[in-house]
Amino acid sequence: MTTDEDKTNKTDKTNKTDEAGLAGKIALVAGATRGAGRAIAVQLGAAGACVYVTGRTTRERVSEVGRATETIEETAELVTAAGGEGIAVPTDHLEPEQVRAVVERIDRERGRLDILVNDIWGGNHLLDFHTKMWDIDLDRGLRMIDLGMRSHIITSSCALPLLVRQPGGLVVEVTDGTAESNKGFRENYYYDIAKYAPIRMALALAEDLKSVGGTAVAVTPGFLRSEEMLDAFGVTEENWREGIKHQRHFALSESPVYVGRGVAALAADPRRERWSGQSLSSGQLAKAYGFTDADGSRPDVWAYMAEEAAGAKPVLEDYR
């Protein structure tokens, strides 16, 4: 029997990030407090980048999400421990002046920006699934639009003038689902719009960035085992499989490391412009770049669900 440890050992060489791959590169990961944003920041650091990490939860102040255990300071420390340089900057990305201040600091301290990752969200506590649009409180709905769309627009508007000074910049819009998987309704009017918008943002930015040799993509994790999701299922990263009894698709869930490795591989790819304008999943990136999740597996829940939606009867184990 092949154990997770065996798988990890076999793929260890594949998953070792080229330490010089992003050396000298400057990244801004907006929304790096936890989950995908934190993992992306850490993996960019592991590839040698200097990473400015932003978010609203610090060791002194907690955002509306209410999770005091995950802070941007801790994310920055993890980036540095991974081999990069992590710099935490408390920022509310719905406040243009705060975002401008971050960009001005990066310009003052580094003189360039090579990678922008828009992973701003923090709206899960507002979700009312299986609720008609007219039954959802308007303020709750508009807050989701602000968190999932307006924050991304503000950040790109403020950061792109610095990013486009040099050719070859990369913008990553992190969302939930690809253009293909988001063709169906996402069970909440506001959530559906908020999570489809970054896909269109990447498409539009890809057109704008062509003239300066830049690349813009949307990236989605699969069934993400974020800190928040693990708590919701009453499990930890060590015993996460217990959650399968509550949701069978959880068998194809992935750790945040997976999407982090995907974005780092994309950022280090000198031919990444071939992806520009597309929406990509962590599973797609894993196949293209040959990395695995932390346990040596290669889950692809979106591919599984597409087969399932088409009327096939795919085997879960074949997609991990």
Image (cartoon, rainbow, N blue to C red):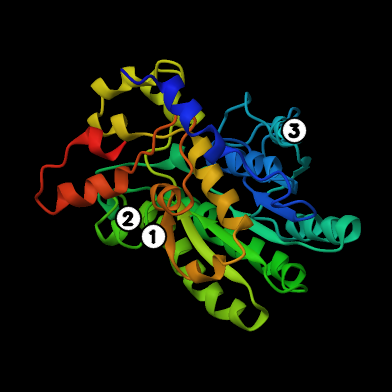
Front of the two marks 1 and 3:
3
Picture quarter with the N terminus: top left
Q: Quadrant of residue 117?
A: bottom right
- Position of 232 compared to 67: left or right? left
Badge 1, how many Cα within 10 Å: few under 14, some, many 20+? some
Q: Amino acid at mark 3?
A: Glu
Instruction: Examine the rendered structure and indicate whether residue 65 appears above or below residue 69.
Output: below
Please give the residue where the numbered disc 3 appears in the rendered image: 73
- Counting residues from the N terminus, which is met first, the one under dot 2 or under dot 3? 3
Residue visible at 81% across and 57% down? Answer: 101
Task: Identify the disc placed on residue 193.
Answer: 1
- Counting residues from the N terminus, which is met first, the one under dot 1 or under dot 3? 3
Front of the two marks 2 and 3:
3
x then y, percent, for residue 252 = 32, 34
x then y, percent, for residue 221 = 43, 45
Mark 2 to mark 3: distance in Å?
34 Å
x then y, percent, for residue 99 = 73, 57
Task: Identify the disc placed on residue 189.
Answer: 2
